[in-house]
Amino acid sequence: QVQLQESGPGLVKPSETLSLTCTVSGGSISSYYWSWIRQPAGKGLEWIGHFYTSGSTSYSPSFKSRVTMSVDTSKNQFSLKLKSVTAADTAVYYCARDHWGKISGARYIWFDPWGQGTLVTVSS
Amino acid sequence: QSVLTQPPSASGTPGQRVTISCSGSSSNIGNNSVNWYQQLPGTAPKLLIYRNNQRPSGVPDRFSGSKSGTSASLAISGLQSEDEADYYCAGWDDSLNGVLFGGGTKLTVL
């Protein structure tokens, strides 16, 4: 079955850019939506945004000015870049495949599967 | 208002039935479907319920979801010690044009 694995630096300095990669195995990255979600320690989940492998993206308003998502279909990987980070961006970052669409006017979106998550600490 | 409200905690004894609520508004639950995730300590969230009441394969039928108006509920029957986890509701919000997660409910099995 499809498995996801996040990778990237565990420590980023304030004002710099956080860069993470999610590697998809057990299936093709093409023709799906893929999301990034984060969770600060001891807190709840926060959706950062998602993209479709054709290139369309949708970012949460909370991150829109700072985030870029991209895909490398040849490597079955996708990436997250979050610029101008602060300590508030310290969190476990998850990648996930999402299922997004509309039925009878109702929007649906769910995340399955998820990667195991990677902790990114923003500190000098 | 773009927020999904869950009780911070819930508890039950083994074998009992517990429910966790998720309250929203017309821009989210009222107009769109709801999903539920289970997060065991130290692990990634796992999809438990999608599109209000659908169970992915492998999820026991002890777990069920429902939706009415601008609220949704997760019910767990025959509570087991391994159900002790954080539970999150989530769904699309039309005003936010993005995904909302509830604040999470910590379930304790006494």
Image (cartoon, coloured by chain):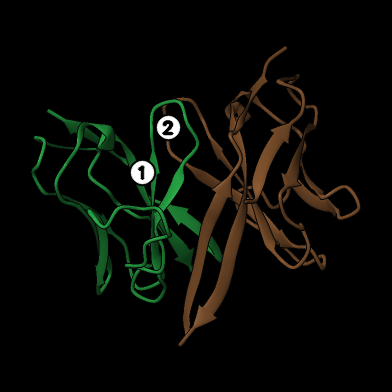
Q: Amino acid at mark 1?
A: Gly
Q: Return the residue nearer the eye: B61 or A123.
A: B61
Element marked by disc 1:
loop
The reply to whether residue A30 is visible in this rendering is yes
**Residue A14 located left or right of residue A61:** right
- Using the image, determine if residue A109 lies above or below residue B13: below
Q: Return the residue nearer the eye: A29 or A15.
A: A29
Q: Colour of chain A?
A: brown
Q: Which residue is mark 1?
A: B103
For disc 1, the neighbor class at 10 Å (few under 14, some 14 to 19, many from 20) is many
- Using the image, determine if residue B52 lies above or below residue B60: below
Mark seen at residue A43? 2
- Using the image, determine if residue B66 lies above or below residue A84: below
Q: Quadrant of the N terminus of chain B?
A: bottom left
Where residue B53 sits, quadrant-wise, is bottom left
Asked whether the residues under marks 2 and 1 belong to the same chain, the reply is no
Q: Position of residue A43 (x, y in %)?
A: 42, 32
**Residue B88 located left or right of residue A20:** left
Q: Amino acid at mark 2?
A: Lys
- Residue at (69%, 53%) from the top-left corner? A64
Measure the C-alpha gap from mark 2 to mark 1. Answer: 8 Å
Q: Return the residue nearer the eye: A21 or A91.
A: A21
- Residue at (16%, 42%) from the top-left corner? B79
- Residue at (38%, 33%) from the top-left corner? B40
Q: Spot the green chain and give its letter.
A: B
Q: Position of residue B100 (x, y in %)?
A: 46, 55
Q: Chain of mark 2?
A: A
- Using the image, determine if residue A31 lies above or below residue B12: below
Q: Are marks 2 and 1 in contact (CB under 8 Å)?
A: no
Q: Position of residue A99 (x, y in %)?
A: 57, 65
